[in-house]
Image (spheres, grey):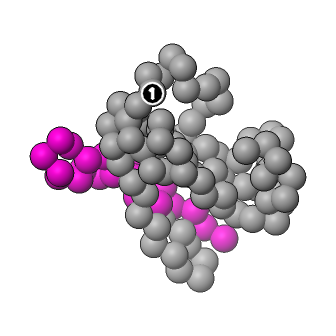
Amino acid sequence: MRELYGVACRKADLLLSGHDHALQLFAPQPECPGTWTVVSGAAGKADRDRAGSRTAAFEAYRAPGFVWLDVRPDILTLRFYTVAATGVATLAHTQTLRK
């Protein structure tokens, strides 16, 4: 992902990626100021101990989930959902980014 930072930093407000281990939201990092990072597509495979060292604004492990984006001209709302074995989605976190 580091190679994407060079392309996106200071140019993109949000970097979306998919991964089968975690559902995460990272605020802008020192190496990529101004760019939030969303990791979605969580299949719930990883334990927190093995998932990395960056502090996340939100993260969910060991539970499937997805991110719903509501895009407006000057507001982006990110809604993170986890999904139970029964198929029921539950809102786990909301983050609003303003331009």
Nearest the viewer among 99 and 5 is 5
Please identify the quadrant where the C terminus is shown: bottom right
| Image coordinates for residue 17, horizontal then vertical, percent | 59, 53
Quadrant for residue 13, please give it.
bottom right
Q: Is residue 4 magenta?
A: no
| Residue positioned 61% across, 26% down in the render | 52
Q: Look at the image and tell me whether residue 92 can be seen.
A: no
Secondary structure, mark 1, is loop
Quadrant where the image shows the N terminus: top right
Percent position of residue 11, x then y? 82, 65
The total of numbered circles placed on residues is 1
Residue marked by disc 1 = 46
Looking at the image, which is closer to me, 22 or 93?
22
Residue at image position (20%, 43%) is 84
**Mark 1 nearby-residue class (10 Å; few <14, some 14–19, many ≥20):** some
State whether the magenta stretch is mostly helix, strand or loop.
Answer: strand
In the rendered image, the residue lying farthest to the right is 6
- Magenta residues span 78-99
Q: Quadrant of residue 64?
A: top left
Is 98 or 37 nearer to us in this picture? 37
Q: Is residue 42 left or right of residue 1?
A: left
Give the residue type that dot 1 points to.
Ala
For the point 42% across and 44% down, which residue is it? 42
The residue sitting at the left extreme is 86
Q: Does residue 83 show up?
A: yes
Q: Position of residue 49 (x, y in %)?
A: 51, 17
Q: Residue 74 location in percent, x, y?
A: 60, 77
Say which quarter of the image contains residue 63.
top left
98 horizontally vs 79: left or right = right
Nearer to me, 9 or 95: 9
Residue at the extreme bottom of the image, as rendered = 73
